[in-house]
Image: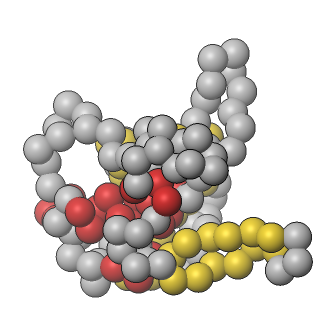
Amino acid sequence: MIRLDVRPAMEPGGYHLDRFDVLDGGRLVVARTRRPLSDAARALVAAGVDPSTLVTSRHDAAAADSFRPVAIGEAATWAAEESDRDGLRRRRRPLGTAREHREGHPRTGDDGAAGRVVPGDDAGASWATVA
């Protein structure tokens, strides 16, 4: 099982808005994402982790996990949406169709930088061995 640590992405001046960094054992998986679990799960699947590996997350400095573990492959298909009418909802989205994986989303002006995998010193390492 993989336990991801979710931390607010700090901006200059020491504050954060609505973006988070996701780490696995101190190694950055994705940076500045609005959807920490699903974006991290997509990055792990792309890195070769077995989709049946269980994953959970924990907010920085929390004593308990945020939810019961789920398969990484399932979490990778989730998309969170919020509306005034229905509130926050989770729905399935096929892999590779999430907005953050397209270049320059026209409505938000997203340059595609958020929610991307950020290679570290060990960029060639595989998470497949962590499971």
The relative height of residue 47 versus residue 110 in the rendered view (above or below) is below
Compared to residue 73, the image places residue 5 above or below, namely above
- Judged from this view, the residue extending furthest toward the right is 85
Residue 92 position (above or below residue 38):
below
What colouring method underlies this structural image? secondary structure
Is residue 20 visible in the rendered image? The answer is no
Q: Which residue is found at the position 36% from the left and 74% from the top?
A: 95
Residue 14 in the image: state x and y as whole percent. Answer: 68, 21
- Extreme left residue here? 124
Where is residue 104? Give x, y as percent. 47, 44
Return the x and y of residue 102 as percentages of the image width and height.
Answer: 41, 54
Residue lying at 21% horizontally and 76% vertically, measured from the top left: 50
Work out which quarter of the rendered image holds the C terminus and state it.
Answer: bottom left
Q: Is residue 68 visible?
A: yes
Q: Quadrant of residue 126?
A: bottom left
Q: Position of residue 113 (x, y in %)?
A: 44, 39
Q: Residue furthest top?
A: 13
Residue located at (26% from left, 68% from top): 45
Count numbered badges in the picture: 0
Q: In which quadrant of the rendered image does the N terminus lie? A: bottom left
User: Would residue 67 be found to the left or right of residue 42 on screen?
Assistant: right
Q: Quadrant of residue 122?
A: top left
Side of 124 relative to 6 (left or right): left
**Residue at figure coordinates x 34%, y 79% from the top left:** 73
- Is residue 32 shown left or right of residue 51? right
Query: Looking at this view, is 20 or 63 the one in front?
Result: 20
